[in-house]
Image (cartoon, helix red, strand yellow):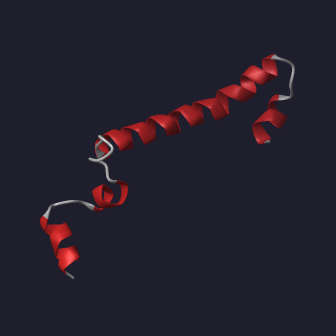
Amino acid sequence: MSQQHTTQASGQGMLERVFKLREHGTTARTEVIAGFTTFLTMVYIVFVNPQILGVAGMDTSAVFVT
């Protein structure tokens, strides 16, 4: 009980406690932006890669599905 009280008193959020953001020199905002950027990059790759492989002679629909 005292440890829970100490954690709440220090003002640390759940993300800070679980991932030790300050210890790793980052913030929740930075990590959210990085995750969003990674997601957008992967979406781009999923849609563009079949087109590139299609130009190379592969079946675009088969590459997209598998």
Which residue reaches farthest left? 9
- Left or right, residue 20 beside residue 7: right
Compared to residue 32, the image places residue 3 above or below, namely below
Which residue reaches farthest top? 55
- Left or right, residue 2 beside residue 62: left
Give the camera-side residue of 2 and 65: 2
Give the camera-side residue of 64 and 2: 2
Please report the residue visible at 87 percent of the width from the left and 19 percent of the height from the top.
57
Question: How many dots with numbers?
Answer: 0
The image quarter in which residue 4 lies: bottom left
The image quarter in which residue 12 lies: bottom left
x and y percent of residue 47 in the render? Answer: 65, 31
x and y percent of residue 55 in the render? Answer: 79, 17
Compared to residue 30, the image places residue 21 above or below, namely below
The image quarter in which residue 19 lies: bottom left
x and y percent of residue 53 in the render? Answer: 78, 23
Please report the residue visible at 30 percent of the width from the left and 41 percent of the height from the top.
26
Location of the C terminus by quadrant is: top right
x and y percent of residue 61 in the render? Answer: 81, 34
Compared to residue 58, the image places residue 20 above or below, namely below
Please report the residue visible at 15 percent of the width from the left and 61 percent of the height from the top.
11
Please report the residue visible at 32 percent of the width from the left and 53 percent of the height from the top.
20
Give the camera-side residue of 39 and 14: 14
- Left or right, residue 16 beside residue 36: left
Location of the N terminus by quadrant is: bottom left
